[in-house]
Image (cartoon, grey):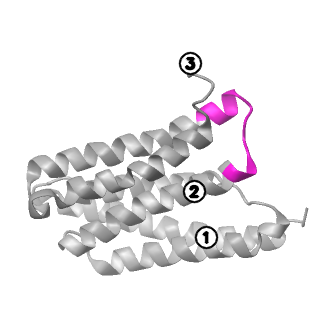
Amino acid sequence: MKFPKFITPNFITVARLLLVPVGAYTLFKNGGNDHNWQIISWWVFFILGLTDILDGKLARSRNSITEFGKFLDPVADKIMIGTAMISLSLLGHMPWWITIVIMSREIGITIFRLAVIKRGVIPANKGGKIKTMFQGFGVGFYVLPLDSSWYWFRDGFMYIAIALTIVTGAYYVKSAFTKPAN
């Protein structure tokens, strides 16, 4: 896919961050229980999730992977997922304990990344990318106005996302201490 030069991977990441409030706005529209607005919100968050794939592919194709991008991209993912989860919990559509578990890990790892940045930015690994995908789809199932007969699937998917969140967090911390300093 060909993009103008001014559309850089970091530009896409920053645009994703700036558009996250649109997803939250559409989720809260008409009190958060309007099925049409829930579907619109799902599409907004889905498109924002696709930009995460796009910025990575663009960075690799242009050989323009930067330290700033390696740091900001996962932060943008956390803000996007966190905004959706907090919004869903405020609306009563997602249990707060899920939001607290996932956001505690995400905020903790972000603080940890800042604390060890002198050793170099630790980029997202395959496990972290899979975790982010499961979180995105898991949260998406809570955004969608699913029939209650599908809650077992939605909840099961989210439990897998929670397990991946915890396991990859532990792996991330371990890898930071086993990686030689730059």
Residue 173 visible in image? no
Tag 3's secondary structure?
loop
Kind of residue at badge 2: Pro
Asked whether 168 or 23 is in front, the reply is 23
Tag 1's secondary structure?
helix
**On the picture, is 24 further left or further right than 171?**
left
Looking at the image, residue 5 lies above or below residue 60 = above
Looking at the image, residue 101 lies above or below residue 135 = below
* Residues drawn in magenta: 57-68
**On the picture, is 73 further left or further right than 150?**
right
Kind of residue at badge 3: Lys
Residue at (54% x, 74% y) in the render: 107
- CA separation, marks 3 and 2? 24 Å
Which quadrant of the structure image shows residue 102? bottom left
- CA separation, marks 3 and 1? 32 Å
State the image coordinates of residue 59 (x, y, percent, origin top left): 66, 35
